[in-house]
Image (cartoon, grey):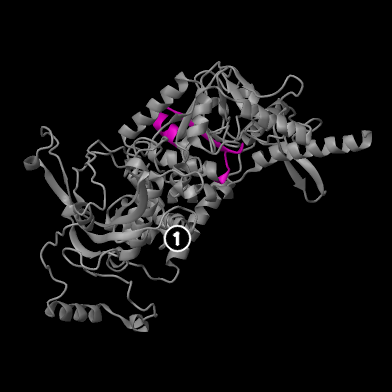
Amino acid sequence: MGYVAVKGGTIAIEESIKRLKYERIQQGQAIEVEKIQAGMRGLIDQVMSESSLYNEGLAALAIKQAEGNPEEAVFLLRAFRSTVPRKHYSRVIESGEMHVERRISASFKDIPGGQILGATTDYTHRLLDFSLLKETDKIVQEWLHHYHNEGAGGETGPQVLPKVVDYLRQEGLIPPCENNDSEPDDVTRESLEFPSSRSQRLQILTRGETGAVTSLAYAVIRGYGALHPTVGELRVGTLPVSIDHPAGQGNNDEDAFYIGEVKVTEVEMLMPVTVEKEYGKKELEFEIGYGLCFGQNETKAIAMGILDNCLEHPNNEFPSHNEEFVLFHIDSVESTGFISHLKMPHYVTFQSKLDSVRKTKKEEKQEVTTG
Amino acid sequence: MNTAYNFAFFDEGSKREIRRATLKAIAIPGYQVPFASREMPIGRGWGTGGLQLTLSLIGRNDVLKVIDQGSDESVNAVNIKKLVCDTTGVETTEHTEEATLIQSRHRIPEVPLRKGQILVLQVPLPEPLRYYEPSESQTKKLHAEKEYSGAWLMLFEQIMKYGSMTTGADHPVLVNGRYVMAPSPIPRYDNPKMQQNDALILLGAGREKKVYAVPPYTKVVSLDFDDYHFQPESFEGKHCRLCGSTGVFLDELVDEAANKTVYQCNDTSYCLEKLNEVEKVGVN
């Protein structure tokens, strides 16, 4: 009988996976995916946005499997995304068609259509609400009943509102711009090359890890950047998505299919810039930084708007204005993957380095003895 | 076999796209071809580039071997093998000779590869010039212009500082007289194996979204100087404590009982084959 390979690795992995399952359910309670979907809107929105996959049900499942760890949930959804063939591209969506649920402007008090606070934590006191310890399905349903009786929470009809930016444009405070109707690049089908296109930048920013995008934008406004932005308009609402008839000719409105709606946060940031006119005359104008992401992710959308504008103005003084620095380092799956890979064995590479270190030590000794 | 997913995990369109990038890589030895790297069910940085190559190439008749740092049984090798088997149902082996497709991290097997085999290497950092130039658009230009003085200077500086080249694994090579290439973090000991190899060597970097290749019978030379030669790791006077092999890459271990340093073949399947040969001879 010959020698056989030790099967240590296989058994160890199987036991480790079993242990992981045990940790997830050890308290003897199974959390229903429906409950996650019903009550963890913030996490679901964040996970959908970072995964760039819009599906609340799958996001809830990923969150359950990942024991609520967003890094892991995003990883699961991205991997799933790789197995889904790309059958259609949606038709162009005009974000002006958004059914607005919340919309504010930090630049103007009286905006056409008014400010709509909607649902926000901005003005809650962050005091732990101990009554939630005893909240039950029954209490929740009674509250809902009263809420509906008050006439609130119902459909108030589609709220399609004019944009603040359009108003500024009419006033001549923002230079007019043409629609850019060129086909956008798709960063999931073709890898990023530099200099990047704006469509590539916006895609990578919107898929970016919430914390990473926020940190870099924070650095910009704190001093490591050249921007002083204001929120021109922030909207949360739903956008209708439709696709062309697969067998149809061209993009005919009548043949298009409505396939559903996505909830998004859209932000237009205003950045004052100095522009030089004729005869060296200087004028102040506003520029736009654009942020849009799945779900209600307001901090991320604002941060994205800031970084979008930064990358429109490359500046080697600040890493936040360097497209390679920003775009290569904000993806959750990539950054967490490479950091965590350091846990893998590096025995061979380390042995190799050891050899070099010993060699230099030996030469040092020789020099000392001969010198 | 997990039938919830397509054969080899990806949809067919994705596989074709990766193969197209691979063909381009083979046509331009050592050149890093960008590709639309997919997110995989294993971590980015844990061999997703290699895995994507393997999955795009594997067919029902392939025999797969996966090694990680020389070992078939390393947890990550087991994990990758499990995923490929789960979604393809192909046969696996530990014998280098039997495999048609070998995915490896940080080693080229000791048993010489043969014509028709494909070796897929997992690459963490595909850019050999990244050490001194952080910008991707700059390194792309440097490659286009064959401007490699930085790579030579890097080695020169090491000699000035330390008296010898101090690259560990991933010592840069010149492929086909044209592109400087990161051979992936294989030990320097494995670099010469790339030269005029009978097999096709593919290198995949998932996180960095690059594929590159060393086609069979390609000239691959480790960068060095006329007066300071490229030096593989030295295991002079050392042998494997199990099979007695010399002239292989050895792991350094500490024998706790005797409190001394001992050595053992890093390529575990090679070591096993040697041991079994010895046993057979003994029986006769």
Left-right relation of A261 to A57: left
Instruction: Classify residue B277 by image quadrant.
Output: top right
Residue B70: within the magenta?
yes
Residue assigned mark 1: A21
Instruction: Classify residue B152 by image quadrant.
Output: top right
Q: Please provide percent x and percent y for residue A39.
A: 30, 69
Give the chain of mark 1: A
Return the residue nearer the eye: B268 or B30.
B30
The quadrant of the picture occupied by the C terminus of chain A is top right
Residue sitting at x 26%, y 70% = A119
Q: Please provide percent x and percent y for residue B100.
A: 49, 26
Whether residue A50 is visible here, answered yes or no, is: no
Q: Which residues are magenta?
A: B52-75
Residue sitting at x 38%, y 26% = B20
Q: Mark 1 belongs to which amino acid?
A: Lys
Return the residue nearer the eye: B215 or A119.
A119
Whether residue B142 is visible here, answered yes or no, is: yes
In this rendering, the answer to whether B55 lies above or below A61 is above
**Helix, strand or loop status at disc 1:** helix
The quadrant of the picture occupied by the N terminus of chain A is top right
Q: Please provide percent x and percent y for residue A226.
A: 44, 52
Q: Farthest front residue? A: A279
Return the residue nearer the eye: B137 or A80.
B137
